[in-house]
Image (cartoon, helix red, strand yellow):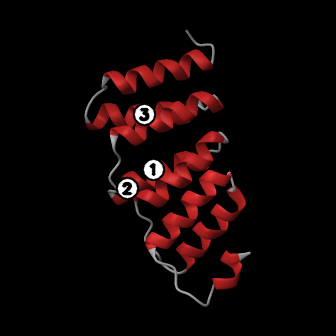
């Protein structure tokens, strides 16, 4: 695999990591994403919003609690979290019936800017998918 061929030979940049992770999202390759994330962290690469975005998408669709950890890390590091990202993640939470993460996202939105119509609407979709009317 191309990633394994360049590991240790070519230093990773934050942009390269984001690009690799975005490709992993397109292909649904969680294993490669985990390897790329681990390698980046080992090399001290600072993950940017694009990398977090891709990792969150991958883990949210699977209902993986790692998404909650990544979201908390983003907040702790002060990485910009847009309303669009939150709404997109809430939509993915609905598909995966991942209500725990949906509620974390909403808690963040409420604390930061309050609930917008789009966030509220996405949350209602989560509840509907979980049969919680």
Q: Which mark is residue 76?
A: 2
Compared to residue 43, the image places residue 46 above or below, namely: above
Asked whether, in this view, residue 16 is left or right of residue 111, the answer is right
Q: Check if mark 3's residue and mark 2's residue have beta carbons within 8 Å.
A: no
Q: Residue furthest bottom?
A: 9
Of tags 3 and 2, the one toward the viewer is 3
Mark 1 Cα shell of 10 Å, populated few (<14), some (14-19), many (≥20):
some
Image quadrant in which you'd find residue 60: top right
Q: Of helix, strand and loop, which one carries label 2?
A: helix
Q: Residue furthest left?
A: 113
Return the x and y of residue 35 as percentages of the image width and height. 66, 68
The residue tagged 1 is: 72
- Label 3 vs 2, first from the N-terminus: 2
Compared to residue 63, the image places residue 45 above or below, namely: below
Q: Residue furthest top?
A: 133
Tally the marks.
Answer: 3
Image quadrant in which you'd find residue 82: top left
Closer to the camera in the image, 133 or 19: 19
Label 3 to label 2: alpha-carbon separation: 20 Å
Q: Check if mark 2's residue and mark 1's residue have beta carbons within 8 Å.
A: yes
Q: Which mark is residue 87?
A: 3
Return the x and y of residue 68 as percentages of the image width and height. 53, 45
Q: Check if mark 1's residue and mark 3's residue have beta carbons within 8 Å.
A: no
Return the x and y of residue 84 as percentages of the image width and height. 37, 39
Identify the residue at image location x=37%, y=51%.
75
């Amino acid at each position: 695999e191309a990633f394994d061929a360049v590991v240790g030979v070519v230093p990773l940049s934050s942009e390269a990591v984001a690009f690799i992770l975005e490709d992993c999202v397109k292909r649904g390759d969680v294993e490669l994403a985990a390897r790329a994330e681990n390698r980046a962290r080992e090399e001290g690469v600072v993950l940017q919003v694009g990398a977090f975005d891709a990792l969150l998408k991958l883990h949210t669709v699977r209902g993986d609690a790692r998404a909650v950890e990544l979201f908390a890390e983003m907040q702790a590091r002060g990485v910009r979290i847009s309303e669009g990202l939150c709404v997109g993640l809430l939509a993915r939470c609905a598909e995966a019936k991942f209500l725990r993460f949906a509620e974390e996202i909403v808690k963040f939105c409420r604390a930061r800017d309050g609930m917008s119509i789009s966030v509220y609407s996405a949350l209602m979709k989560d509840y509907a998918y979980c049969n919680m009317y």
